Amino acid sequence: MKNLYQRAEFLTSVNHLPQLPEDIGIEVAFAGRSNAGKSSALNAITQNKRLARTSKTPGRTQMINLFTIDDDRRLVDLPGYGYAKVSHTTKRHWQEVLAKYLASRTCLRGLFLVVDIRHPLQALDEQMMHWAATADLLIHVLLTKADKLKRGPALDAWQRYKKQIKKFGPHVTSQVFSAESKLGVEEARRVLDDWYEF
């Protein structure tokens, strides 16, 4: 099947919500802790290694980056959170921006929360899910870096996550994913197809 997400192209980067494009169409946002593999996940889904900038340095994504799929649909790469070396002012700014974006962006359909499968959900991950659930957004948890674990431990971790995310409502879904081995890439695209109404 043709990968519709290969069409994704960079649109703009913004630092403040008033700079966002007009609030129409459908947006799906990708969020996650710094170094959870968010940019790599976006690049694997779109089959474009250069779409989202990846870095070994945590906290590289410091703007809201938007990519167009077509005239009505956009992918949104949100700034990584939880990076210790960012100033308190910057942290506070992005917490406020992310909370407002999730609460007020009418065209936002859902949130892909990117989490490193080797680590339990952190307070900031739960905060993002709480904001998204409060805004009635769809939530899909992408458990990345699954190639770093053997199949058994990866499935065990997934079961633990499923128990943890239950409290955010029955519509929260999750999957095991690896940008490196391409595990779960097709499944992630199917979720996006559904949300974008392809």
Image: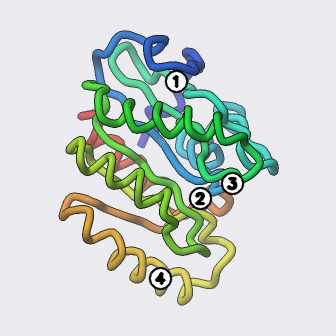
**Cα distance between the residues tagged 2 and 3:** 18 Å
Amino acid at pointer 4: Leu
Earlier-in-chain disc, 1 versus 2:
1
Dot 3 crowding, Cα within 10 Å, few <14, some 14–19, many 20+: many
Question: What residue did someone put label 1 on?
Answer: 66
Q: Secondary structure at mark 1?
A: strand
Front-most of 48 and 134?
134
**Cα distance between the residues tagged 1 and 2:** 23 Å
Q: Which mark is residue 33?
A: none
**Image depth: mark 1 or mark 2 in front:** 1
Can you name the residue that lies furthest to the front here? 88
Question: What residue did someone put label 2 on?
Answer: 182
**Image depth: mark 2 or mark 4 in front:** 4
**Cα distance between the residues tagged 2 and 4:** 16 Å
Q: Is residue 48 above or below residue 163?
A: above
Q: In the rendered view, how is the structure colored?
A: rainbow
Q: Secondary structure at mark 2?
A: loop
Earlier-in-chain disc, 2 versus 4:
4
Earlier-in-chain disc, 1 versus 4:
1
Earlier-in-chain disc, 1 versus 3:
3
Question: What residue did someone put label 4 on?
Answer: 155
**Image depth: mark 1 or mark 3 in front:** 3
Amino acid at pointer 1: Leu
